[in-house]
Amino acid sequence: MVTRAAKSSFPCKTFVVDKKIIVVTGASDGIGAAAARSLVDLGHRVVVVGRSPKKTELVAADIGMPFYLADFKRLDDVRSLASQLKRDFPRIDVLANNAGGIMGPRELTVDGNETTIQVNHLAPFLLTNLLLDVLIASRARVINTSSGAHKSAGKLDLDDLTLSRRHTPGRAYATAKLLNILFTKELQVRFGPDGVRAAAFHPGVVNTNFSSEYGGLINLGFTSVARHFFRSPEKGADTLVWLATTNDWQPGLYYKDRKVVRTSTQANDLQLADRLWECSVSLTK
């Protein structure tokens, strides 16, 4: 039986061998899909990773690139995805950890983690670590999609990453985005000497479906506002594409619109980043 994460497809296409191999998660829609299209237009080979079979396959078919399916609410899907990628790609030049979103009211995954924290942080943390040997050998760059929302996370409690106290969908998302930045900084500290280059970025407030799992009036209101006032997925993806394809940036930092921007005080706490790493290892087993 084929699992969701094990399913893949390789359409026939002639690739330019001197271009980058770029894995983009959350590439079935929004920023990820826009980034995938832009990267292919620049001549790179993009590996499309998404959760929705129909939407992921459509994006992959549209740009003529391979695709994989994985639901980040299940860490076994992440493990299967990593195994498939390592089997099929002995070199990965860029891993863009872009999958994420606001997952709604507090709910635990089958792995026992708060859903928003797992989808946005623990799943990409696990995927990156499972691919580390390939990433190090490739001297790869790891790009983590964060958000300016991290500044409203409140005091981070590593002893309560399931957010059993004072949970709201917005606080869970803000906390997850803070974790993305801390993960980026610690990844650079630990594996920068081995050639890995890590960065986090804020895409801006983008008109995408990232709040769709909220459901109800909240998502309806967000979607209505987004349609009129927020930036396009293409604009939101611009910094991701820039980080993936240029060398005009310093690793270990947080970017918006191709520029370094300030983070919250907690996001610069390297001791907290080190503790988060060990906590994430435990939660992803």
Image (spheres, rainbow, N blue to C red):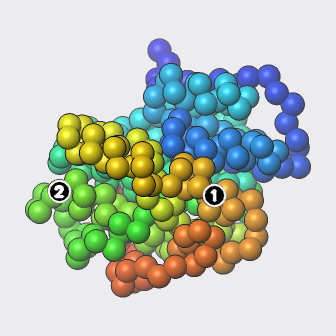
Q: Residue furthest top?
A: 1
Instruction: Name the one closer to the observer, 51 or 61.
Output: 61
Task: Describe the element under mark 1 as helix, strand or loop.
Answer: helix
Mark closer to the observer (1, 2): 1
Going 82% across and 45% down the picture, which residue do you hit? 43
Q: Is residue 20 above or below residue 275?
A: above
Q: Residues within 10 Å of mark 1 (few under 14, many from 20)?
A: some
Q: Residue furthest left?
A: 165
Q: Is residue 276 visible?
A: yes
Which image quarter: residue 154?
A: bottom left
Q: Which mark is residue 238?
A: 1
- Alpha-carbon span between mark 1 and mark 2: 30 Å
Residue 147 % position (x, y):
43, 64
Residue 245 % position (x, y):
74, 59
Task: Describe the element under mark 2 as helix, strand or loop.
Answer: loop
Residue 130 % position (x, y):
54, 50
Residue labelled with disc 2: 168
Q: Is residue 167 above or below residue 224?
A: below
Is 170 situated left or right of 284 in this image? left
Is 33 situated left or right of 263 in this image? right
